[in-house]
Amino acid sequence: MRGENQSSVSEFLLLGLPIWPEQQAVFFALFLGMYLITVLGNLLIILLIRLDSRLHTPMYFFLSHLAFIDVSFSSVTVPKMLMNMQTEHLSISYPGCISQMYFYILFGCVDNLLLAVMAYDRYVAICHPLYYTTIMKEDLCVLLVAGSWILSCGSALLHTLLLTQVSFCADNIIPHFFCSLPILLRLSCSNTSLNELVIYTAGAAVVIFPLTGILVSYGRIGASILKVPTTKGICKALSTCGSHLSVVSLFYGTIIALYFSPASSNSNDNDMIASLMYTVVTPMLNPFIYSLRNRDMKLALEILFRNNIVFTK
């Protein structure tokens, strides 16, 4: 389509979740409660790690960054979704839509890479415990986190710059609760083959490489445990990896269940369910997983609670 036949789009309309009007109040309260739990729970984890010197280790250093990412990931989409549900003001400006898509990709990529980094940390802790402090130095930890951010920024920026090159015509209705890149490409009235190629290459690599690293790390951890199959060794490995493995299973289990199962429902509905899992459910559950399954976190929480009681008396 030629440029003179195109009309610029200044805003998009987010249709949001397919909820009946009489159910809006119930779902608004539900998602607002889940979002508040996500923010407060993850900020509590960051606070505990900063205040308790016993938690100043590589594992909790990575966990504090993961908690920050969970808060940020939810904050990109959920507040706008809640505002739309309450006010029924469905429009979002073109710059706002592009920005939302950028940060959604950014935090999603960092989340993937951090899970892989944490799996490597657990591999070193179990398979090479004597060299753990030598290998997982502060410089390496900072480098791994910084590398995750740099790669994620590059990936998100690449998708965003390519999207700004495509044109949008009359259709500006997004059947989703946030600006999803695949849906925006479907709304475009120009050639998006390059964008789709980047999604299937650079985008897929951000998921496949971290997942491969996680599987290799836990494969070696499993092989190490089998060499000394004692009850004590298995319990120690589970206490060390249990929380992270639970988060990984929840995160990638959603992908496998929704995208690799036989398509029995609309693909857009599947995408919305998956997005809700990533941005609402998983970030909300992570604080519970790491606090309830982690002895150090529970101890730090008890100390903080006791100190607050002492100071308030």
Image (cartoon, rainbow, N blue to C red):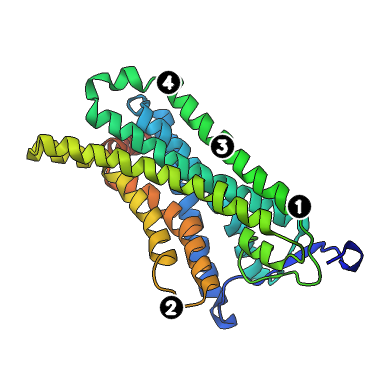
Figure check: 286 above or below 19: above
- Give the amino acid type for the residue marked by disc 3 in the picture: Leu
In percent of width and height, residue 45 lies at: 41, 40
The quadrant of the rendering that contains the N terminus is bottom right
* Real-space CA distance between mark 2 and mark 3, rounded to the nearest whole angstrom: 35 Å
In depth, the one of 225 and 297 nearer the eye is 225
Circle 1 SS class: loop
* Real-space CA distance between mark 4 and mark 3, rounded to the nearest whole angstrom: 20 Å
* Real-space CA distance between mark 1 and mark 2, rounded to the nearest whole angstrom: 34 Å
Residue denoted by label 4:
138
Residue denoted by label 1:
164
- Which mark is drawn over residue 285? none
Count of number-bearing discs = 4
Residue denoted by label 2:
264
Figure check: 90 above or below 279: below
In depth, the one of 64 and 135 nearer the eye is 135
For marks 2 and 4, the one nearer the N-term is 4
For marks 3 and 1, the one nearer the N-term is 3
Circle 3 SS class: helix
Residue visible at 34% across and 20% down? Answer: 135
